[in-house]
Image (spheres, rainbow, N blue to C red):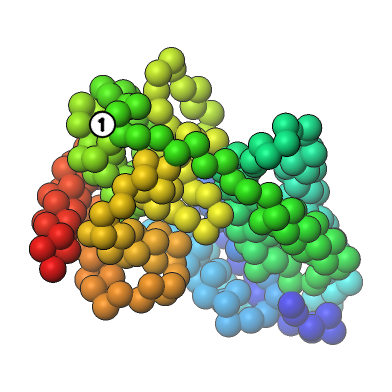
Amino acid sequence: MVKQNSSTWLLLIHQVPTSPSYLRVKMWRRLQKIGAVAVKSSVYALPQSDQGMEDFHWVAQEILESGGDASVCEATFIEGITNDQLIDLFRSARESDYRELEKESQAIDRDLRKPRKDGEAVTPGIAVRVSRQRQWLTEIQAIDFFPTAESRKAESRISEIETRVRKNPMRQDRRSPGDYSGRVWVTRKGIHVDRIASAWLIRRFIDNRAHFKFVAAKGYKPETDEVRFDMFDAEFTHAGDLCTFEVLIDRMNLKERALTSIAEMIHDIDLKESKFARPETVGFGLMIAAICTAHKADMDRLERGAALLDDLYEFYKRR
């Protein structure tokens, strides 16, 4: 939140090269993400703050490195746009974000209200959508410099949905590894810790003839007999406060203590928590980060990560 009586603003005055053509859109998205609003076609404003200065600095540097021109300055408006009008621009931008958020909240609410048989549980996919709603709200609030009632209404709405989801049991559908054999397992491209570990778990303990497919995060329609994991509306994905690796262990009834040790590290890294706070988690996370930095192809990441996880599993199994 920013003081409304502040009269000094940060301005980014820039000129983006016409080539490559995508650069202008890329910069526009950058500015949208940090919450800047357009005062003129090539002039964007932020409330004065250390964070705003840093955000504009990085955008300006990227424009300069791309061959454009950019300056960041502090300014006070004397004629033309007033402080109140500029504040209204920021509020209007956030109100648009809150409206989009509300549409998704209403869609989730409708799904929760659909009639279910006695004892029928909520699908994990709804829990994932609610979790994403909370993340989206957090991102909007971070750039909501002049909050209005819309922020409080969105907070209340999502908190209410979260409470309703917590009160409903998640659909567990426990299976045995024998239910899956030679399947195509689908997940999002750019695999990192949870998807690397989940793919390793699938191939080693669930489906030793598994094939993996890596697809775009949005819009994928599964083919017959494909199984999705760690992606939107997947058969296996985050549920409640469990990451996908933990969900697979639970649903497949895998009870080895060595897997529990690995799951605790996966959980804390993937969910950015310190729930289990194992001392080796930081080192494991660095190894995964190194693998992902050195290897861009998903199958390469999987193979390197699987070798690491094989060794960790044997280590924990023998302790």
Q: Is residue 297 left or right of residue 109?
A: left
Q: Quadrant of the C terminus?
A: bottom left
Q: Is residue 191 left or right of residue 318?
A: right
Nearest the eye: 21 or 199: 199
Q: Quadrant of the N terminus?
A: bottom right
Q: Residues within 10 Å of mark 1 (few under 14, many from 20)?
A: many
Q: Is residue 214 left or right of residue 106?
A: left
**Residue 273 x, y percent position in the rendering:** 45, 70
Residue 266 occupies quadrant: bottom left
Q: Amino acid at mark 1?
A: Asp
Question: Which residue is at 23% across, 66% downward?
Answer: 284
Question: Number of marks in the image?
Answer: 1
Q: Is residue 91 something one can see in this rendering?
A: no
Question: Which residue is at 75% across, 79% downward?
Answer: 2
Q: Is residue 114 left or right of residue 222?
A: right
Q: Is residue 29 shown above or below 14?
A: above
Q: Is residue 301 shown above or below 140?
A: above
**Residue 5 x, y percent position in the rendering:** 84, 84
**Residue 200 x, y percent position in the rendering:** 24, 44
Nearest the eye: 92 or 245: 245
Q: Is residue 291 shown above or below 303?
A: below
Task: Point out the residue furthest to the top here.
Answer: 224
Is disc 1 placed on a helix, strand or loop? loop
**Residue 285 x, y percent position in the rendering:** 27, 65
Nearest the eye: 182 or 102: 182
Residue 13 occupies quadrant: bottom right
Q: Is residue 163 something one can see in this rendering?
A: yes
Nearest the eye: 186 or 64: 186
Residue topped by disc 1: 207
